[in-house]
Amino acid sequence: MRIPEETVERIRQSTDILEVINDFVSLKKRGSNYIACCPFHNEKTPSFNVNPTRQIYKCFGCGKAGDAVRFVMDIENIGYGEALRYLAKKYGVEIEEQEQTPEDLLRQNERESLLIVLNFAKTFFQETLQTTEEGKSIGLSYFRERGFTNPTIEAFELGYTLDQWDALLKEGLRRGYSRDLLEKAGLILIKEGTSGVDKKTFDRFRGRVMFPIHNVSGRVIAFGARILKTDKIQSGSAPPKYLNSPETSVYHKSQVLYGIFQAKQAIRQEDVCYLTEGYTDVISLHQAGIKNVVASSGTSLTTEQIKLISRFTPNVTILYDGDAAGIKAALRGLDMVLEEGLNLRLLLLPDGEDPDSYVHKVGVEAFKTYIRENAKDFIDFKASQWLTEAGDNPLKRAEGISDVCASITKIPDPLKRQTLSQRVSQVFHVSEQSVISEINRLLRKQQEQSKKDSERQNRSGGTLSNKSVQSEPSIDDINSLLDGFGTESPEAASSDSPPSRGQVSIIDSVKLVRTPLSYQEEECIRLLINYGIRELEPGITLCQYVLSELHEIEFQTSPFDLILALFREAYSQGNILTAGDFMNRRSPDGIEIQNQAIHLTTPRYEISDGWLKHEIIVPSEAEIGILADAAYRNILRIKKMLAEQRMTTLQQLLRESGSKAPEEADQLLTEYMHFKRIDIEISSLLGTVISG
């Protein structure tokens, strides 16, 4: 349903983009702005920039840009209306909407419908735990035995589902949710061999305590469940002790960390993330006051999960059980963490203990002390495993050194690799040069393997279609297209071939070649958006100057032509547009214009405070003299390039004028000389050296 425009404006005015983005990414202040590694693409060096004054963000790596609403839409993969509802809930802005009917739900996209029905299920499980006799006697008793308090149960929204075939199904149907939607959410199952009117459906989770799995923003996207009745666990045909939701369009287990919503603020504050294996490990440590803890949600650690941690901290400490399985799990995840550039420490608990049992056994202070005194970096961790196994066997020691060196090669930072090679030589009592040689050998081996894989892929790609082969154009292809740009005659321009509007397509590829003129048009729009309202001299704004100089000139590049038209339209009505007018556009063309406005108003670099400390003064382009000169030279360049374009067209027409009347050829030559004089005059004003 549509949200009234005045409500949208209240939501936008209430929103702080720093608070919104900080829920998903750990921001650090740099100058007047904030930076982070971009959450939308994989990078090691921060290129994601947030401007709190303009309330916008921009990634200089992947190009993502927008305001708080656009960020929520992109990070959560949700629509515009749902992003507004998310922000309204966060900032306590009331939205007056009619109660949704089942028909309304059907009209929503599948993702939103799934999130709504999963939230219904979470609430149903909570109510069952707290209000039914079975829920209190079995589910609540179990949580009490684990030592979970009411605030903890509420914080993790724990629940219980009745030991009945269709308790959730009946309640869902009564509330207006369809069987199809409940099935897509992974809440019900269809009995094999049934379909149509004979289709038999029943609840997926029955007689289990429920652990809702949340995404980063706190929405329930799945469930983990544990069966409690011992007679069912011990019987030969027993259902699995633990059962998780299946993957859906909102839940991909390899991309999710259990407890990340509850832990993200503490991870940022403590600047370290503790990684465990189980739900109860997370909950028990959280209740004990160690809140910067997450679990891998029933899967082996994945690259996507590591990247999720890296949004909030570069430091990870793995807390696994001290048995053989725990050691194996720790070693399995070690190289992946290093490969993503994170700093890693590992801790194995005493044999027979897990984080849940150990924190209850020794208390939170002793647990924290144990972490401080026993957590090891990956070199010490691996070395202790190898040295214990190797004893006096030199070959085993050599194998261990090679294994540790192999982990070091996963680290993308060469300076870190150099430093860690010194640690290996100290731990294994070998020369640093031999360690460096082994690391280099392994790196060369990786490069050779990568080259072989690439060659193999290229060979296997030899049978692909011609279109895929042609996707990368040659230099000759590009030059031939550029040679023809801007030379079409009036007759050619009216043909069926697509016009060149500032960019030239290359062999049906997504790659585009921009003309020099398009960059000058972009610079003109940048000056208008940033400084259009500034007065270059009393009574003359930059906008007035630019529009008067560009009278009857149309830009050739989209969307700069549209933005120029908007400036002209507003100025004709006595108004001068500013950056804010483009940031909030929500028309069909609004996204592209908004992105361009953000791109043109967000500087990639800022002057260091250290320069000011040493009295190094850098002139600002906002100074009137500098700004006036920039606008003046930009207008000259645009007119010069337009003159050169016309001269190129006239040259082509003159070459084809052999069959035309002499008077027509003379007219073309006169017009050519006119534009040539303009070109020479502008070159002189710009101080450009020209030939001919």
Image (cartoon, rainbow, N blue to C red):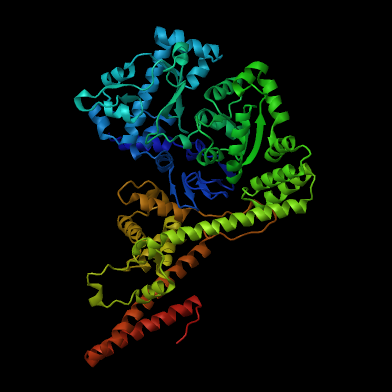
User: Quadrant where the C terminus lies?
Assistant: bottom left
Q: Quadrant of residue 232?
A: top left
Residue shown at the point (63%, 21%) measured from the top left: 353
Direction from residue 549 to residue 140 in the image, left or right = right
The total of numbered circles placed on residues is: 0
Residue furthest left as drawn = 197
Q: Position of residue 48 (x, y in %)?
A: 52, 48
Q: Position of residue 332 (x, y in %)?
A: 59, 38
In this rendered view, identify the residue nearer to me: 659 or 400: 400
Q: Identify whether 435 is placed above or below 634.
A: above
Q: Position of residue 234 (x, y in %)?
A: 47, 14
Residue 645 in view of the camera? yes
In this rendered view, identify the residue nearer to me: 609 or 45: 45
Residue 535 in view of the camera? no
Q: Identify whether 229 is placed above or below 180.
A: above
In this rendered view, identify the residue nearer to me: 468 or 676: 468
Q: Position of residue 683 (x, y in %)?
A: 46, 79
Direction from residue 604 to residue 643 in the image, left or right = left
Direction from residue 293 to residue 421 in the image, left or right = right
Q: Quadrant of residue 191?
A: top left
Residue shown at the point (66%, 36%) measured from the top left: 345
In this rendered view, identify the residue nearer to me: 41 or 350: 350
Q: Identify whether 517 is placed above or below 377.
A: below
Q: Identify whether 56 is placed above or below 266.
A: below
User: Quadrant where the N terminus lies?
Assistant: top left
Residue shown at the point (35%, 37%) measured from the top left: 8
Direction from residue 434 to residue 297 in the image, left or right = left
